[in-house]
Amino acid sequence: MNDNKKISIIRFNAIGDVVLSTIIPFAIKLKYPNCQIHYLTSQGNVKMLKNCPYIDKVIGFKGNIYETIKNQFKQKYDVIISLNYTLKCYALAFLSFPKKVVFKSFKGTSWVENYFYTAKKVYSDLKLPDRLFLMNRDEKIYHQISKQMNSYPKPHIIINPGKYFNQPRQGRVWNIQKWKDLSKRLLNTYGGTVFVNGSLDERDYHMSLIDKNIIICSGLFELEETCAFLSLADLVVSGDSGPLHIASAYNRKTLAILGSTSPNKIKPYGKNGYFIEPSAKCRYCWKKKCRQSKYSGKYCPCIESISVDMVMEKIEKHTLLTQELETVKC
């Protein structure tokens, strides 16, 4: 089989989905290293992908679809893999006139497996990697963030609380008071430092967590810096979110607190990925807003059924943190 194909992958927006889709270039390049793989994505995702060793070129979409189609056509791709089912992606795929257009497969159980089976439409003899591999870190940024974090006691625990008023992700956000209680329990048990990660518009919401050895980092980092930040954690605890999957792609120990979304689809991929699922009967509805109207704008009963004790038991059972930390290879 010819391993010199020129391939374009198209996936916009959601950071988590883009991270999970990197299983495609990873799987292909492991088997066919001479392939040339380009990745067309939202401009905001470029810095996250630009150092990935399995992607030869990352292209940021700047809003001009006609100019982008023209540039895609000039590349003369053998295969275009379109991972968004939108009119824009159809146009970018078909009007670039590749030899073949491939769409996302739904053959697998998890989203990572779906993306892998998409890659198998191009090369049928691929093997599923046992982990994600996002990128090589920018060394300057890595050392800068490392120096800042190492001024605080270890272990370094990063939590990603999200925000309760984020309606499209309502069932994925755990109660902020539980995050506070969990942080104190972790510090009392393991010592170290809890860093709070999030976006700038979540910062005010996260400020209620501030306490001794709890450092609010929300809104302080650009995406490339956030990647370095997450790659240095000893443990990342998060709801279903982009940062959860970024940390997993760096082979960090990750623990997902799940509510409305199913672990069969989105649990952290790899041997260092763990999850806690809710006991509520209404779990895994995948709705953007809680279908029980009385919980509109509040924490949802699915994820509320997870207690701090359950999270601590999971961490202790799987020895996700120890006072003498082993080094985990990225």
Image (tube, grey):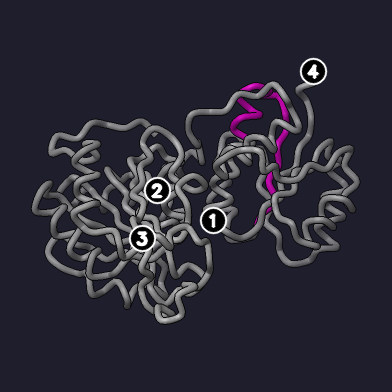
The residue that label 2 is drawn on is 228
SS type, badge 2: helix
- At label 4, the amino acid type is Met
Q: Looking at the image, is mark 1 or mark 3 earlier in the sequence?
A: 1
Q: Which mark is residue 1?
A: 4
The residue that label 1 is drawn on is 15
* Mark nearer the viewer, 4 or 2: 4
- Give the residue drawn at x 91%, y 46%: 97
- Magenta residues span 25-41
* Mark nearer the viewer, 2 or 1: 1
The residues tagged by marks 1 and 3 sit, at their Cα atoms, a distance apart of 28 Å
Residue 219 visible? The answer is: no
Q: Looking at the image, is mark 2 or mark 1 earlier in the sequence?
A: 1
| Residue 203 on image: x %, y % | 34, 73
Q: Residues within 10 Å of mark 1 (few under 14, many from 20)?
A: many
Please tell me which residue lies in front, 293 or 90: 293
The residues tagged by marks 3 and 2 sit, at their Cα atoms, a distance apart of 35 Å
